[in-house]
Image (tube, coloured by chain):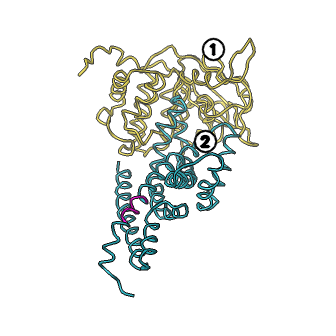
Amino acid sequence: MPPTDTTPEKDAAPLRGSAPGIRFEKVIKRFGSNTVLRELDFTVAPGERVTLIGPSGSGKTTILRLLMTLEKPDGGLIFVGDDPLWHMDRGGKRVPANQKHLHEMRKRIGMVFQQFNLFPNMNVLRNLTEGPMRVLGVPRDEAVERAKGLLDLVGLADKIDAHPSQLSGGQQQRVAIARALAMEPQVLLLDEVTSALDPELVVGVQDLLRDIARQSDLTLLCVTHEMTFAKDISDRVLMFDQGQIVEEGPPERMFGEPSEQRTRDFLQAVLAT
Amino acid sequence: MEWDWSYTGDIIPDLLRGLRYTVIATLLGYLIAVVLGLVWALLRRTPNVVVRQVVRWVTEFIRCTPLIPQLFFAFYVLPTWGLTFGKLTVGVLMLGIHYSTYMAEVYRAGIADVPRGQWEAAKALNLPRTRVWLDVVLPQAVRKVIPTLGNYLIAMFKDSPLLLAIGVPELLTSARSVGARTFEYLEPMTMVGVLFIVVSVISSILLRRLERHYATN
């Protein structure tokens, strides 16, 4: 049995700081003839926690998917920190990013999905160590220690050998959160992370994310329909409609006294359900 | 025409020798088909469009032409080009290659069945391409198609008498030569059926166990 007290970073590691900011410059995204984002501009400060709200189809999730490189923009520039995500400099010129550049940029970003997307063929431990070992080159022992620390954090230390199919939705989502944190991202994207959960499981996941948001200095981008959660977790709320920002501001004002009629209508509709 | 038990007993050793060839040819051919089929399926997903199309048409051609002319081609034509193999080798290779094109379709369906979220999660974790395939996609895809892959083992076993066409001394060949020697075909041909059914049933039972094993684990 190797000594475990030689890993002082065990607790600190997953929540490392110096997060980069995010900047969208005239970003365009189309799906076929449907333009989801039209020359969108917005900025997220380093370490800022921003929630995107708005009706479905307004482009919120697309923003997260562009940042995770799951979708490719049709125009404009996206910066993560000082570097463009989808472009790179070659001989003073800005050219489309190659796989290597995307790979390097993705190291800064982590994502938690609505449907969890854990790997069903791996147990919980392997889900958490696969990325650190295969991508970051973390030695096995260290990856296991890190995974154990994260499972403690999400309250699932006893599920380390379980397979995803043996876990409830809420438990799966906690593991998925731990899996994203295991990669030590500086930007964390949360895509409707409680939408697929049974109502009684929502609170646990939200509490966990609230703690994480409080303890870390991650830059956080969150898409959610849970307005209380949005209020708790974010420094700023952006209201989207048809690929444009309708209104933005601190959560107290956005939820308390929104100035735009569109925002008021949307909040009324959401709170009515 | 009466069933002669002592004659049946006499010919069993000859038939079992034939069965041995049948089983060896099937298993080796299956091994080739399982591996080569996966290779085809993966090549059909490469970014290179030329490779993709060439593989697509070659496999389509092999799959849509009968095995017997393929066997004759390999056995009679290839030697004129200086490529000479033994009967069993040609039989095993062609059986394997022919069925690999069916297996490729099976793998293709299995891969297409892996949910998009799995690819996206793998990308979000930044896994390199080879790890995405080896650790995430293939284990899930292959597990789903294990029952189908297993059925092809039995299908290949049943097709192995075609190797008679190029003179591989498999089960049907042995039965025929026994019959030719004694002019009694009832017992040898019936025993061919019996032996095929015995091996098929045993294989199905083993395959079903394997399936259950993968379904529960």
Looking at the image, residue B74 lies above or below residue A185: below
Structural distance between the alpha carbons of marks 2 and 1: 38 Å
Looking at the image, residue B51 lies above or below residue B69: above
- Tally of numbered tags: 2
Q: Residue B29 vs residue B42: left or right? A: left
Q: Which of the chains is cyan? A: B
**Residue bounds of the magenta highlight:** B15-21
Residue drawn where x is 62% and y is 50% of the image:
B79
Q: Is the magenta stretch mostly helix, strand or loop?
A: helix
Q: Which of A197 and A116 is in front in this view?
A: A116
Kind of residue at disc 1:
Asp
Q: Which of the chains is yellow? A: A
Q: Is mark 1 on a helix, strand or loop?
A: loop
Label 2 packing within 10 angstroms: few (<14), some (14-19), many (20+)? some
Label 1 packing within 10 angstroms: few (<14), some (14-19), many (20+)? few
Using the image, tell me which numbered label, if any, was put on residue B43: 2
Using the image, tell me which numbered label, if any, was put on residue A82: 1
Q: Which of B30 and A151 is in front in this view?
A: B30
Query: Is any atom of residue A226 visible in this view?
Result: no
Q: Please give the chain letter of the residue carrying mark 2.
A: B
Report which quarter residue B154 is drawn in.
bottom left
